[in-house]
Image (cartoon, helix red, strand yellow):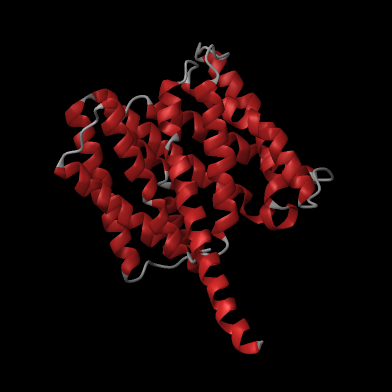
Amino acid sequence: MESDAGPKAKVFVAWRGWLLLAALLAGNVALATGPWLVRVADTGPVSAGFWRVFLALPFLVLFARMSGQRLGGMPRKTLVLVALGATAFALDLASWHIGIGLTRLGNATLFGNAGSIILLFSGFVMARMLPRGFEWLAIVCALSGAAILLGRSLEISAETFAGDLFCLTAGLLYAIYLITLQGERARFGSWSLLVWVSVFACPVLLVLALALGEPVWPTDWTPILILFVSSQLIGQGLLVYSLGHFPPLIIGLALLTQPAVAALIGYSVFGEVLMPLDMLGMVLVGSALVVAKASQRRVE
């Protein structure tokens, strides 16, 4: 019996590892389809962000209940922090969705994930320490790659350059959102915190969409529903399920599937062609993302 249990256990562990890796990659691929769906939705881009968050709210409440996380009883100080973090998250989503319509999908996805690099920089500032080794390389790659991509966007048109800036702003706002709520996640649980973030973020997105004069109510619900299911339920769900099982380096490498898939969609659906210089810029920023993720535990 014992001789059979050993090999069977090893096979089970191996299969479980592959399934977790598949979940991590599938989550990133699902998230990479988000920019495409934002573009084809017949609402405004900020309105699409509102529906994405609003439709997920009942499911977040369900997940919080199933996890045994409490939804009430938060101190006023925590609610203020959640409100600030949720506002940053809402502005992040709005800025990113606006940028998606103005620049190439690969650029939008890459710059939208720049929060990891910004968190790395903020970690050094808060820890009052200088980068070391490959972390300096990450900084050089991030700045060089961003300069190349922004320069190429400016060559194409002022509109694509503005789109890249919107997406970079989104990455900054997402980092602010994470930093604001970093200490509260362990105290109240991620699901219950996400419920409150959604409660505060939805009105901000709706008011902003109305202020911009966007069409809010879709005539074709298909892109909005697919966006909500793929980005929030499947994408975020698979990531939440798999992230705790991998070191940051693997997570950073998996993260690079998002701009790759988005660039492929941009080429096949919208005819967005990447030149060799564009690819170099994406490789440089992508390399910085990997190093930033790999360094995340040390600087937090």
In the figure, residue 140 lies in which quadrant?
bottom left
Residue sitting at 59 percent across and 25 percent down? 51
Q: For this rendering, which residue is in front, 184 or 104? A: 104
Q: How many numbered badges does the structure rendering display?
A: 0
Quick one: quadrant of the N terminus?
A: bottom right
In the figure, residue 167 lies in which quadrant?
top left
Q: Is residue 110 visible?
A: no
Q: Is residue 13 visible?
A: yes
- Is residue 257 shown above or below 45? below
Q: For this rendering, which residue is in front, 9 or 54? A: 9
Q: For this rendering, which residue is in front, 208 or 276? A: 276
Residue sitting at 47 percent across and 41 percent down? 30
Percent coordinates x, y for residue 187 in the rendering: 73, 56
- Is residue 159 shown above or below 255? above
Percent coordinates x, y for residue 40 in the rendering: 42, 21
Q: Is residue 10 left or right of residue 285?
A: right
Residue sitting at 23 percent across and 32 percent down? 153
Residue sitting at 49 percent across and 66 percent down? 247
Q: Is residue 218 left or right of residue 268?
A: right
